[in-house]
Image (cartoon, grey):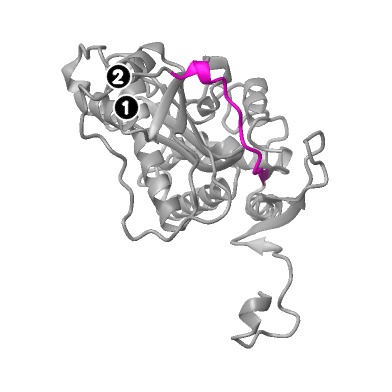
Amino acid sequence: MNQLAQSYTLKHGSVQEPETYLGAKIRKWYIQGSEDPNKVRWAITSDDYVKRAVQGVEDELLRIGQKLATKVSTPLSGGYRPELDQTPELDPARATYFQGLIGILRWACELGRLDILVDVSMMSRFLAAPREGHLDQVFHIFAYLKKYSKSAMVFDDTVPVFDQTRFAKADWSEYYPDAAEAIPMDAPAPRGRAVTMTAFCDADHAGDRVTRRSRTGIIIFLNRSPIIWFSKQQNTVETSTFGSEYIAMRICVELVEGLRYKLRMMGIPIDGKANVFCDNESVVVNSTKPASVLKKKHQAICYHKVRESQAAGTVRIAFEEGGNNLADLFTKCLPGPRLRQLLGHVLW
């Protein structure tokens, strides 16, 4: 900012450390127990945004003689399935109110409330024709946010360390001889320290009780900082867990490729291949062993996309036990203890 002030006129007193960004509070963070506990990291919190949003909902409920639930441990009620809800449809005014609440919740997810991402994604499917039960469950999400109002997403620059033996090495030249990562020709010269990219992907096979479509969940880190989080129902019905997991892997690889391209255009150096973890052993074997054969031809696009990215040196794929797969956060509604266990690896 001092350098900019040499060329531009800045308002007196305007040069200071950042405090807010698009509704999120920004603050310094110190990680106790790290190699350098005095090192400054930065964190964003949505606490103030969530507090204002909850207050707005409580005011509306008070107007109609209701209030938020108090005994909540998960964003949605236990066992609730929005696709099975047969309560009456909302009138136009209440439907518009429902849509507004979903918009508020979606922005809370953007500001780091990853614990409600899959629930908000599931409820967003019914924006066109919401029902009374859907609105009640949105109120339940706000009740959850009131109880668990504080969370912080810390941008930790610590480089993760992985056991290199987890990643299979193979010669792909016979199968994909021309495979190469897309490198922007007009990218600026990289500056600063290189970042390590890590991704976790998962799928909830046939999770939708009506359409039997699966849900993809992905989270991508730069060093130890979460950068991209993704939860979306798949566009096709897969007859096997393998098929739904391979679709999730393909989407994950495409997100990784897009992020690597964007970082290079920003002049940010990338340290080696992206580390991708999946909890389906068949997908890992098919993706990492050149001689493995695809038995279901309708999955050929995902199969070759993932393998070619591995051959190009863009990613390297390893197996991760389902109990440790962070992407499980974004595929299904988890019980309270399991939800908070996984969140402990992402949010503070």
Q: Which residue is mark 2?
A: 243
- Toward the viewer: 83 or 255? 255
Left or right: 31, with 213 as reference point: right
Q: In the rendering, at what x and y percent does residue 181 appear?
A: 31, 41
Q: Amino acid at mark 1?
A: Ile
Please rate how many residues cluster around mark 1, counting C-alpha atoms within 10 Å: few if below 14, some from 14 to 19, many from 20.
many
Q: Residue furthest bottom?
A: 9
Q: Residues within 10 Å of mark 2 (few under 14, many from 20)?
A: many
| Residue carrying label 1 | 247
Q: Quadrant of residue 188?
A: bottom left
- Amino acid type assigned to the residue bearing label 2 in the image: Gly
Residue 187 position, x and y percent, is 38, 58
Quadrant including the N terminus: bottom right
Does 161 appear in magenta? yes
Determine the residue positioned at 34% across, 18% down. Answer: 170
Side of 198 relative to 7 (left or right) = left
Query: How far apart are the alpha carbons under marks 1 and 2?
Result: 6 Å
Number of marks in the image?
2
> What residue is rendered at 67% in x and 44% in y?
154
Q: Would residue 237 be seen by someone viewing this image from the given angle?
A: yes
Percent across and percent down for residue 65 are: 67, 47
Which image quarter: residue 305?
A: top left
Marks 1,2: beta carbons within 8 A: yes
What residue is shown at x 62% (from left), y 29% (from top)?
Answer: 74
Membership of 40 in magenta stretch:
no
Question: Where residue 276 is drawn, which disc sits there?
Answer: none
* Residue toward you, 21 or 196: 196
* Residue stretch in magenta: 153-167
